């Protein structure tokens, strides 16, 4: 399988996992947007709504979203929030 195909497959899995957790974020007035998935397992997201200004955003990002993504998509190595 070509690298591009692997990245596309991983991106689809990441999108599905984000859709799974999105309702929890939206319930608190926040949201998350997928920005980029790289071939080396780095996923970039943008926190929106209440999440973007929340003091607990980094905890949500690392302990919540990143851990869930790593469970669902083992190829994910790191989750980064971008503006």
Image: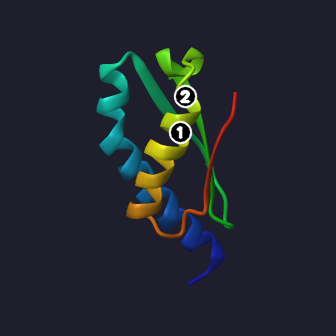
Q: On residue 34, which mark appears? A: none
Q: CA distance from mark 2 to mark 1?
A: 6 Å
Q: Are marks 2 and 1 in contact (CB under 8 Å)?
A: yes
Identify the residue at image location x=50%, y=22%.
Answer: 51
Question: Of helix, strand and loop, which one carries label 2?
Answer: helix
Instruction: Report the label total.
Output: 2
Q: Is residue 42 above or below residue 51?
A: below
State the image coordinates of residue 9 (x, y, percent, origin top left): 48, 66
Identify the residue at image location x=38%, y=15%.
Answer: 29
Q: Is residue 28 left or right of residue 45?
A: left
State the image coordinates of residue 10 (x, y, percent, origin top left): 50, 64
Q: Is residue 19 above or below residue 48?
A: below
Q: Is residue 38 above or below residue 18?
A: below
**Mark 2: few/some/many CA within 10 Å (<14, 14-19, 20+):** some
Question: How does the figure colour the protein chain or chains?
Answer: rainbow
Query: Could you say which is closer to the camera, residue 10 or residue 75?
Result: 75
Q: Kindly indicate the quadrant of the structure image that contains residue 18.
A: top left
Question: Of helix, strand and loop, which one carries label 1?
Answer: helix
Quadrant occupied by the C terminus = top right
State the image coordinates of residue 14 (x, y, percent, origin top left): 46, 54
Q: Is residue 41 above or below residue 2?
A: above
State the image coordinates of residue 32 (x, y, percent, origin top left): 48, 32
Identify the residue at image location x=34%, y=40%.
Answer: 21
Q: On residue 61, which mark appears? A: 1
Query: Could you say which is closer to the camera, residue 18 or residue 50?
Result: 50
**Mark 1: few/some/many CA within 10 Å (<14, 14-19, 20+):** some
Give the residue pinned by disc 2. 57
Quadrant occupied by the N terminus = bottom right
Identify the residue at image location x=62%, y=80%.
Answer: 2
Q: Kindly indicate the quadrant of the structure image that contains residue 28.
A: top left
């Amino acid at each position: 399988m070509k690298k591009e195909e692997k990245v596309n497959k991983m991106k689809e899995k990441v999108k599905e996992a984000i859709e799974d957790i999105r309702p929890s974020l939206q319930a608190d007035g926040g949201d998350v947007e997928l920005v980029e998935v790289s071939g080396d397992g780095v996923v970039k997201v943008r926190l929106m709504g209440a999440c973007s200004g929340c003091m607990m955003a980094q905890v949500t990002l690392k302990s919540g979203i990143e851990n869930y993504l790593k469970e669902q998509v083992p190829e994910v190595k790191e989750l980064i929030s971008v503006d």
